[in-house]
Structures are given as C-alpha cells and as structure tokens.
Amino acid sequence: MKNNKLFVFEFISGGGFNQSEIPSSLFCEGFAMLKTLIEDFNALEFDIHALLDYRINHLSEFLPAHRIVQVNKDDNFLIKFKEQLQETTYSFIIAPEFSNILYELTRLAIKNSSIVLSTELKGIELGTSKFQTYLFFKKKGVNTPSTYLLPFKELKLNKIQILENVCKIKGPLLIKPEDGVGAESLFYYTSPLEFEQNFKSFMEKVDDTRNHVVQEFMTGRDLSCSLIGYPKEKPLILSVNSQFISLEKNEPNSEYFGGETPTDNMKAIKQELSKYLPSLDETMFLGYYGIDFILEKNNRIHFIEINPRLTTSYVGVRNILNVNPAELVVQSKLLQEPPPFDVEHRYHSTFLRVELKNLKEFNDSRFHESILPALLKEIPEIITPPIQLQSSLNSNHFSPYSMFIATKTRNKKSSHEKIQEIFRKFKDLGLAPIMSSQYMKKFLFP
C-alpha cells in the first residue's frame, strides 16, 4: 500500500551536502528537526521514508523510519530524492531557502504528484526573499525595520553605490544575505560610519555572489512565533519562542544556537500578535511556518522575516503542547481547517545546540562503545547525538563533538535547572561544553 507512505526529507542530513563539507551547526539543527518530525508522524501511523548522508548513516538507529536510503559521496541526491517521491504518497520537505533550494525541491515534489505537507510554492517564494518580505510587511501596514537591497551583481562591488544604500540607515545596522537563513553570514555595525571604516574587511569576508540587504537594527527581544496556516481561517499561533542569537561586531560569525518556548509573557505577546496577523493575509502559508520579530521594551512589535518551513523551534514546541503538532499539520493541509479542540501549553522547553570538548581524549571506538550509550541513557533530552564531523572531505581534522538537546519541564526555572544538570553529567563523562560565561549568563542563567 502506497497510501500512507510519507517521505520526510531534511536537506543537510539527507544528502544535500554529500559532495561537500557538512556544516556542523546546520547539521545538528537539521537532524534534530528530522528526528522529531519522523517521531511525530510515526505516531500518526505513517509509513515513513527518509534519506541519510553516508557520513552519518550510523545515526539511522535513532530514526524510527520504515525505510532509510543512504546517499553516497558520488550520488546525485536528486535522483534518490525523486525515487522516494515516486514510492510515497506524501512528502514533507525541510530545506534552507538559499539558492532557491526549498522552492526547487518543493516544485519537484509537486511535479511528481506528491501531496506536499510542508509549505507550498507561493509562500516559499515570498519567504525566501528578505527584501520582498519587507515590502510585503510595508504593504500590509505592520511595523518592520527599514530595509534596502544590496544587489551585488548589479552594483559590481561599487563602494559608492553600496555606501549610498547603507547610509540610508541612520543608526545600528545589519547586513545579511537576501535569501539567508537564521543568523547565517550576518554582519552587525553600530553605524554607517563604522561600516565605511570596515568596508575593505567586509568585502574580503562577504559572499559577493549573493545579493544582500542592509536592515535597521532594532533593540529588543529576539522572538519568533510558530504557526499553523489555513486557507480560509486566521493562522493558529502554536507558541511564541525566545531565540538565542549571538551577534559579533564587524564579523560574519553571528549565530543562532537555540531558544526556549513558551517565552516570558507569552499570553500578552500572543494577544498583540493576533492584532496584526489577520491583516497580513497569510493564506498563502498553509501548514507549519514561522515569523521572526523583535519586541521592544514598550511592547511594540517589529516583524522581521517569514520562515516558510519547519524551523528549529519545532523541537521545543512539540514538547510543550497537549497535541502532536504533526496532527495539526495534517489537518491544515488535508482538511484545511483548524482543530476541533483547544491547543494548550502544558510544559516548557529549552532547546540548544551544544559543542563538547573531549577532556579525556577518548578514541572514536571507545566513545561510541561506552561514552555514547552512557550519554543517551543518562540524558534523554539529547535529540541529535554527539557527532564529530571532518572539517573537509580531504582532511583528517575533526571539529568538537556537536549535539542538540531539548528539555521538557514544568516551567522555565526547571528547564534551566535541567540544563545545568545535563552539563554536570557531560563533565562527569569527560566532556566539557564549549560555551562562554557571557553566553551562559545572558541566555540561561541571568
């Protein structure tokens, strides 16, 4: 029977990087989304298929899928992607927006007559472009930071033209890829003058093959909301999430490393969001998607981006609800109507990418034979098991162990206590979290 077969594809772990280095941070988030989504659809009795990169095929034991196909180094992963589409009825695609990857994979799924349970093309097309999203927000009359396009290919790296656009921002500013994801390749400057003073350094580090935007930097809380969209109803706000984002001045080393949900004062924030969401006419976003926004101290909301896909916060959101969110996805995509019951918050979750230093210098076999089983037994909050990825396909140099964890506790205080307990267990097993005291103080233990 093909009717209940679902192909769940996550680009980073599913072979999208099979011929290049796998980015460690993106892999941890990607595998965490893949694992949790497979678990949730598995609970709905789907027969699940997935692809897995050959370098991480040993992690297949952690995925409750019915069929996992390995993507090898020399494979064209698109061929195996198409094969799985043809063998299944439904598909759910998790992929980055850059280079139109998410759009093209979704288009390919539709072309192969797959019933797509992730966001469809119209929403992806808008959400992929940060500048078009800005224009969309402006058209709908909601607060959004001033944003200007830096079309590098058209400007031909002309310093004067670039500065003209940057100087339209009067205060602190961000420069980021127009189709970027998360905090990827994000530059922060305190003023246009500081940017001008660091222009040479910027041009040496920026990816000048991609268009960028310059955006007014807003001071406030970095938040996101996770939503389920419907064709004729206002979207359902599943949760409002805090985002842990580290900004590094004048360098493209800013990064997103997790968050927590629900955020403080979520009820009041949700009420404020509900005033704006109907005016956005988001019926093009069906199923699960997210919106990033800044909340100022005066509770004014500034909409930043629309994420037309499953986001990392899903691994936390699924832990706090009274319902399986995959069930809500199916209802929205197939029945196209809200659930006949209230969606409630019952728990709190802190979700976090962690890097670990091997204090006792275990060899690879000892780590996998004794340390890893002990970790998984002692710490059920582990979503992506610790893994070391080579820095390149032709190198023997490995990065630290990277992993992803998510708590499920009664409240924020107990979530933070659980994180502290987990870190103590790491150290007892000879593994030290690589985190700065500033990071710990700012996000977890204020």
Image: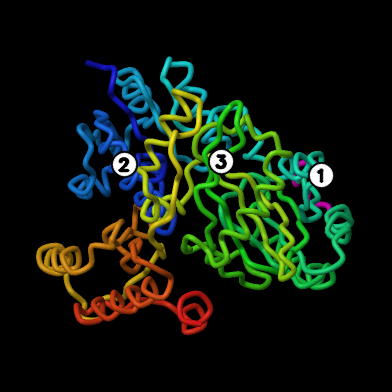
Q: Residue at point 26% right, 37% down?
A: 42
Q: Which mark is residue 40?
A: 2
Q: Secondary structure at mark 2?
A: helix
Name the residue beneath numbered marker 1.
Answer: 141
Tell me the crowding category of disc 2: few under 14, some 14 to 19, or many 20 or more residues within 10 angstroms, Cα based.
Answer: some
Q: Quadrant of the N terminus?
A: top left
Quadrant in the picture for residue 115:
top left
What colour-coding does the image apply?
rainbow
Identified by mark 1, the residue type is Gly
Name the residue beneath numbered marker 3.
Answer: 97
Q: Secondary structure at mark 1?
A: loop
Q: Nearer the viewer, mark 3 or mark 2?
A: 2
Q: Secondary structure at mark 3?
A: loop
Q: Earlier in the sequence, mark 1 or mark 2?
A: 2
Q: Give the extent of the magenta segment.
A: 152-158
Residue 323: x and y in percent read 37, 44
Quadrant in the picture for residue 372:
bottom left
Q: Measure how far apart labels 1 and 2 are at the Cα level.
A: 37 Å
Identified by mark 3, the residue type is Glu
Q: Nearer the viewer, residue 245 or 285?
A: 285
Tell me the crowding category of disc 3: few under 14, some 14 to 19, or many 20 or more residues within 10 angstroms, Cα based.
Answer: many
Q: Nearer the viewer, residue 22 or 222?
A: 222
Q: Nearer the viewer, mark 1 or mark 3?
A: 1
Q: Residue at point 81% right, 44% down?
A: 141
Q: Earlier in the sequence, mark 3 or mark 2?
A: 2
Above or below for 368 versus 442: above
User: Can residue 21 be seen by looking at this rendering?
Assistant: no
Quadrant in the picture for residue 192:
bottom right
Q: Residue at point 34% right, 54% down?
A: 394
Q: Nearer the viewer, residue 357 or 421?
A: 421
Tell me the crowding category of disc 1: few under 14, some 14 to 19, or many 20 or more residues within 10 angstroms, Cα based.
Answer: few
